[in-house]
Image (cartoon, coloured by chain):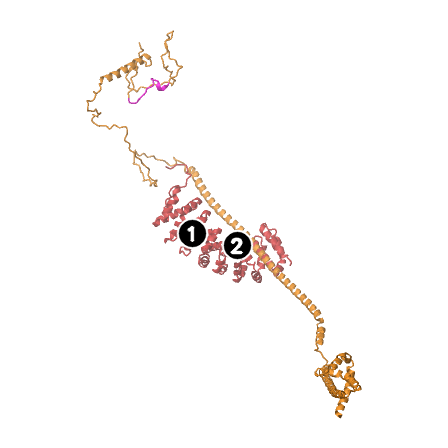
Amino acid sequence: MVPVRAPELAVPASVPYSFSSQPRLLPPRPKYRPRQQANAAPREKSPVHHCNIMIDPRVVRGNVLSVPPPPPQIIHPSTLGVKRHRRAQKLAKRLTEEQIRPGTPEPVKGREHVYVQTELYLEEISDRIIEIDGECQTDEFLDRPPTPLFIPAKTGKDVATQIEEGELFDFDIEVKPILEVLVGKTVEQALLEVMEEEELAQLLSHQRAFAELRNAEFAELQRLEEQDRRIREEKERRRLEHLEKLRKQKETAEKIAARAFAQRYLADLIPSVFNNLHDSGFFYDPVERDIETVFLPWLMSEVEETLQKKILGRTMLDSLIRVVVEKRLDEFRHSPPSDQKEAPAEEPGATDGAPEVSGEADAADEPVAEEEETDQPVAEEQPTDFISSQLEEQGQEATADLETE
Amino acid sequence: MAQPRISAYLPPDTDPTKAALAFGRRALPKLNEELQSPELLTQQRALMALCDLVHDPEKVYQAIALGFLDSLKTLLGHQDQTVRQKATEVLSVMASHSIGREGLIRSGVISALAGLLDDPVDICRKNIHQTFDMLAKLPQGAGGVLQAGLIPPLVLKLKTELDEIQELILDTLSNCLRVEVSEALEAGAVTVLKEKLSHPSTAIRSKAAWVLLEISSHAEGKMAMCNEEVIPVLLSLLEDTQPEVQENSAGALMFALVTPQGRSSAMGAEAIPPLLTLVAEETSKARLNAIKTLTLLAELPEGRQTLLAHRDTFLRGLDDPSEAVQRAAEIAITVIDWKP
């Protein structure tokens, strides 16, 4: 006998069924029936074994939303016998259903069976579901147009309130903070502006100070530059002057040295020049020159003349003697006198000195005379003066003799 | 809904003359597109909004990166004067930031602005000159102004412009002429500046003296100063009532007297007494410059003689709080005591 639930619980569901309990782990269901134990104690569920929730038949499987939940069981659904019973029922039902509907006979030969839809509206049966892609895109951001003026329609009732003087607020007290803020903000803004201007003025004055310093330094720089330039120019000028002075000094020294040297060099120039000139005969005593040029040539020419005369005389004498000798020779040949030969032998010995001079012109001299001439030229040279004077006398005598003849 | 709590945010800025600003990063690109739109009103409103934005350095950086300068350059030639005025204002505010200055120099805005020097509207010209002034404070900016060949037109403008603008021009010139001076001399700057030295306005006199100082720091400038006989005028300015004028004219003299001709002309014009008064005055700003000028004069023999008598003035300068003045006084004493 299964326990019967209380009658109020058997009311058909007007409120959807709900059940809740504290979650607890379900005890496992062993795979095999446990062996009948000897003590045949009522089988209790052994909570030690845990079971997989996926194969737990107690968990509702399948669509839970469309199928109406089974009405609440009168019996507790967890008894094993009931479960077995229900399973058997299900199986029987399935078998009967299958048996009720006979299958279609096999097709006749030559024909084919085709499945055809016979409902009112045909259905396309296909695996593939028709899909259509659609997309949408937001527009580029436009400027938000100005909101149109929205004045909501008047709804509701108008209610008015009358406020008496002094009820709502006290002006004097309320206005203070407002005024404070107003004045404060204005003053603050004014201060900011004034500070900005002051800052600008400070910056400007700072700039001016810097510019002043810069200008002063610059002017100093230029002054020093100018000074430097002047000093450099001055130095340059002085240096050039000094150089000029040195150069002039050097030149003067050189000039002096040159002068001294020239003086010394030319010191004995004059004497030597005079000497040279003197030696080359430029300075002559006119009387001496005169004597030399005029007198002496004349003298020499006179002497020469005289000598020529003497030579002439001697030549004459020679020719005379020759004639005489030839004559005597002829005479001797005819009658050989020996003492007359001695006499002309002295004379030809004496007169041979004279025809030396004329011996050159006289080519018909005898070889005896020539020998005598060669023997006696040395001896004859010395006493030429003496002989010349003798010959002179003899020549004079000969001429006198000739003249007298 | 009104609350008794005071909001921390400023009230909403609903100026109808300004274009609406897009949010965040889109603000400047949108303004750029609006600037290029053909409608005049859009352009004007965009320019007004841009003027306010450009006070922020980050916006300046972004604007330059986006290429605003090209659109602004195109707008400079617009017929409408508001557009031109605002465009020049934007450029002048950009030039007050360092990023803006670099961007302006790189993109060659200087030559574009040069075309507007003869603009009939005063504010445009003033903004242009302000831009030049800020740009010339940078060395590259000064170089850019010189390369754009702006010096001769600026010098010419000095003769004809309004006083405020003349001050700006003088500032620009002073920064540019520090670099190179030949173009200005050819344009006859020294003559123009000599006239300006006798202008009634203090600022113009002092700035003109400053420009002369920069000119005479170059060698050709010194020659020009001697030729144009500016030194006597500067000497008369030494007795001016305003300290800046005194200071600047003493500075100009300081540079001009480096040349021998300058020195002799200064001695001829009796330069020493006013300079000595300037040095003796304890609070004068011109002390440094005056001491330097006297040092230069002391290198001449006559100057040295005269200054030997006033040696104690320089000794007092040694106790001056400013270090530069002390050094200058020491150098002056060394020069005075020098014996050949």
- Give how far across and how far down residue A241 sits, in percent: 63, 63
Is residue B127 found inside the magenta-colored segment of the image?
no
- Give how far across and how far down residue B144 sits, in percent: 46, 53
Specify the segment rendered in magenta. A52-66
> Is A252 situated above or below A92?
below
Question: Judging from the image, what secondary structure is the residue with disc 2 in?
Answer: helix
Q: Which residue is mark 1?
A: B109
> Is A96 situated above or below A158?
above
Shown colour of chain A: orange
Camera-nearest residue between A77 and A329: A329
- Where does the N terminus of chain B fall, quadrant-wise? top left
Q: Which residue is mark 2?
A: B244
Camera-nearest residue between A190 and A381: A381
Extreme residue toward the front, this view: A334
> Is A390 situated above or below B138?
below
Disc 2/disc 1 C-alpha distance (Å): 33 Å
> Is A9 situated above or below A195?
above
Pointer 2 indicates a residue of which chain?
Answer: B
Q: Residues within 10 Å of mark 2 (few under 14, many from 20)?
A: many
Is residue A63 found inside the magenta-colored segment of the image?
yes
Magenta segment main secondary structure: loop
Q: Earlier in the sequence, mark 2 or mark 1?
A: 1
Camera-nearest residue between B248 and B254: B254
- Where does the C terminus of chain B fall, quadrant-wise? bottom right
Q: Which chain is painted in red?
A: B
Is label 2 or label 1 in front?
1
Say which quarter of the image contains residue A166. top left
Say which quarter of the image contains residue A180. top left
